[in-house]
């Protein structure tokens, strides 16, 4: 029998007490808690006909603030049992303000995120994201009084740091303007240029306007291309202008700053973020003057000041970010009543982030996600990370708990390789050091695959051996697989069964083999060659494993593959001292758990793998030291053989593992 159908009327009241209408910027998402079906972006004032069920409702709206960026609110009814015609009213005057600050006064910038969602199963959630910049926007959140649900979760996340760039209008009273550099960063320091308004930046717009040595504000269409922007900036330079502020007003009242494509609720966000079309290396190369993009209500105010011809600005460019905070405040059941947080360093985990290698042409970008009871929270959920450093370190502070990291490479090639993943558990008041992209890069089995969830890197299912080996994991064990879609990564994976070739695939570290259920001895080989300008080390990685495997009932299980990991004391350029004895710590472990390691041999090559010399190895129980004799210059390649008491073995080689200095 079909479930009865009832009317659900959705009403919302803004922060000023006005009832939102169909023409207001107010919408609902309605989610079935039994089946996960979802009605998205339903305008406030609407009436839906829905089957009897349990529903979660999340509404969002904007309340205008004359002369300022709007006030934003997100409110939830975590669980509504629809058993009759019902009207639900979300009164956003019952929400609380969302803010966070730390005991470091200069840390005023960054990005924030409110998330509301429901768990529908072990690995299934539905969520709404509401990004904002607390410097410029008021954000409020709450639940309908007296309501809650075990399925509902909430997160308030803040990535706080000292702004790399600050812009102020100086008359009559100083006011901040949301801004971001387009292309190359401005030189560090402060400047107070006079303002000029240059219209759209065409010759006819600048005729008769005094722009020499001034910061020139250009008002451009929101869909301006990098090529058009470059032309207008060049015209400003011809007229003697010193700097450009590009203002791209939104095409309509809803379009403000960060609007996440197809992300319900994100339309209310007005966080300052440059258009991705105007950033990147091409824009940096094409722009002949320092150029920034300005957004929000204060951008309009800044442009009005420029129109007077008598205004001035203050531009402050700070050094690279050295201190940053990742704060996360999760809750379940309902939104907490208190959402304003003042945090001290002593309450957080202090993490030194060390970025080895990289280059100005291919810098890193860090994404951090807070894992709480199967839910992912954090500002990286917005889809963009924070800039890493090139051969440098940064101090960061984290809310205690489990954090998953993705360190990506911002490469100028088509390859998306170089992504490193890891997960850490942080405790309050403790100090940690995380090294990224540190030598030696090679095969590693730390953690498990993200997709399929909780699957070992090298796994045996009922009748399959499923291989996805991270061949380019860094010295700390952060995992990275070869990029199978990029021409820069080439290689193969081959399986032998009882000494005979069973099958192979022309993919480095990745293959699936359908095998008989009977127990048998196997030999797995794989190799990868990497030819990328951003990867001068570990240019060829090869490995071989022998093991036994057969059918066993149950979920996928890890194969008993051995891992050899080197952690030399290299500098941030991944170089070690040449011309003397050098000791490398080496660990041997097994993917599926503890093992009795029976032996390790290590060899080194100083001519790219043509000739090999044995190293002196000492140690036991999987922990060893390999003593090498370095020449004065060049690079070091490494080869190792290891075995355990169960008869599993591995042989691996890494060409150009690290440099000598």
Image (cartoon, helix red, strand yellow):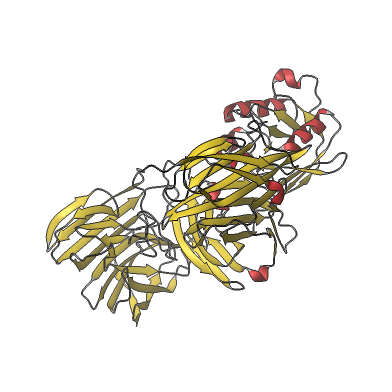
Q: Report the front residue among 132 and 419.
A: 132
The image quarter in which residue 268 lies: top right
Q: Determine whether, in the image, residue 127 is placed left or right of residue 215.
A: left
Up/down of 479 relative to 249, above or below:
below
The answer to which image quadrant residue 102 occupies is: bottom right
Q: Position of residue 280 (x, y in %)?
A: 56, 39
In the image, is 75 to the left or to the right of 577?
right
Q: Residue at x 77, y 28 (%)?
A: 197
Q: In which quadrant of the rendered image does the N terminus lie?
A: top left
- The image quarter containing residue 650 is bottom left
Residue 522 x/y as whole percent: 17, 64
Q: Residue furthest right?
A: 172
Q: Position of residue 422 (x, y in %)?
A: 45, 61
Q: Which percent across, then down, holds residue 452?
A: 35, 54
Residue 188 relative to residue 53: left or right: right
Residue 258 visible from this viewpoint: no
**Residue 379 in sight:** yes
Q: Nearer the viewer, residue 577 or 103?
A: 103
Q: Is residue 237 above or below residue 2?
A: above
């Amino acid at each position: 029998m079909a479930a009865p159908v009832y009317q659900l009327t959705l009403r919302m009241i803004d922060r000023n007490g006005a009832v939102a209408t169909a023409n207001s910027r107010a919408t609902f998402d309605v989610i079935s808690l039994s089946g996960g079906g979802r009605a998205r972006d339903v305008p406030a004032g609407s009436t839906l006909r829905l089957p009897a069920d349990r529903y979660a409702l999340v509404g969002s709206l904007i309340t205008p603030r004359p002369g300022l960026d709007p006030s934003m609110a997100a409110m939830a009814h975590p669980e509504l049992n629809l058993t009759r015609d019902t009207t639900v009213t979300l009164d956003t005057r019952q929400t609380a303000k969302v803010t966070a600050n730390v005991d470091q006064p200069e840390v005023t910038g960054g990005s924030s995120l409110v998330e509301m969602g429901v768990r529908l199963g072990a690995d299934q959630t539905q969520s709404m994201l509401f990004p904002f910049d607390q410097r410029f926007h008021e954000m409020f959140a709450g639940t309908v009084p007296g309501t809650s649900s075990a399925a509902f979760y909430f997160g308030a996340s803040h990535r706080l740091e000292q702004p790399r760039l600050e812009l102020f209008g100086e008359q009559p009273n100083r006011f901040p303007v949301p801004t971001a550099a387009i292309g190359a960063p401005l030189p560090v320091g402060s400047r107070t240029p006079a303002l000029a308004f240059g219209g759209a930046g065409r010759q006819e717009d600048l005729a008769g306007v005094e722009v020499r040595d001034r910061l020139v504000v250009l008002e451009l269409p929101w869909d301006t291309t990098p090529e058009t922007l470059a032309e207008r900036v060049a015209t400003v330079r011809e007229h003697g202008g010193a700097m450009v502020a590009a203002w791209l007003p939104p095409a309509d009242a809803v379009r403000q700053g960060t609007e996440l494509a197809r992300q319900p609720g994100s339309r209310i966000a007005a966080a300052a973020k440059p258009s991705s079309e105007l950033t990147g290396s091409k824009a940096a190369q094409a722009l002949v003057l320092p150029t920034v993009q300005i957004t929000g209500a204060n951008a309009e105010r800044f442009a009005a000041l420029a129109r007077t011809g008598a205004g001035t600005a203050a531009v402050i460019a700070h050094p690279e970010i050295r201190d940053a905070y990742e704060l996360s405040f999760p809750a379940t059941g309902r939104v907490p009543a208190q959402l304003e947080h003042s945090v001290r360093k002593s309450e957080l985990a202090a993490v030194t982030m060390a970025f080895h290698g990289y280059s100005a042409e291919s810098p890193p970008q860090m994404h951090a996600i807070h894992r709480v009871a199967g839910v992912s929270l954090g500002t990286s959920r917005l889809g963009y990370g924070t800039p890493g450093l090139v051969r440098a370190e940064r101090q960061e502070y984290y809310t205690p708990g489990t954090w998953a990291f993705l360190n990506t490479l911002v490469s100028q090639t088509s390859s998306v390789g170089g992504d490193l993943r890891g997960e850490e558990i942080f405790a309050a008041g403790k100090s940690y050091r995380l090294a990224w992209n540190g030598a030696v890069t090679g095969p590693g089995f730390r953690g498990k695959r993200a997709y399929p969830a909780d699957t070992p890197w090298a796994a045996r299912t009922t009748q399959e051996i499923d291989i996805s080996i991270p061949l380019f994991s860094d010295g700390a064990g952060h995992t990275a697989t070869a990029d199978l879609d990029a021409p820069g990564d080439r290689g193969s994976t081959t399986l032998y069964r009882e000494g005979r070739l069973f099958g192979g695939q022309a993919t480095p570290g990745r293959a699936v083999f359908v095998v008989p259920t009977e127990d048998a001895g196997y030999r797995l080989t794989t190799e990868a060659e990497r030819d990328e300008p951003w990867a001068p080390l570990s240019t060829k990685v090869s490995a071989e494993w022998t093991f036994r495997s057969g059918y066993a009932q149950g979920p996928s299980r890890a194969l008993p593959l051995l891992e050899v990991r080197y952690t030399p004391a290299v500098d941030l350029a991944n170089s070690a001292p040449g011309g003397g004895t050098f000791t490398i710590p080496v660990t041997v472990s097994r993917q599926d758990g503890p093992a009795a390691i029976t032996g390790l041999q290590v060899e080194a090559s100083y001519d790219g793998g043509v000739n090999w010399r044995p190293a002196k190895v000492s140690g036991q129980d999987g922990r060893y030291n390999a003593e090498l004799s370095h020449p004065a210059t060049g690079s070091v390649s490494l080869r190792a053989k290891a075995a355990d008491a169960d008869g599993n073995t591995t042989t691996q080689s890494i060409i150009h593992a690290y440099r000598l200095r």
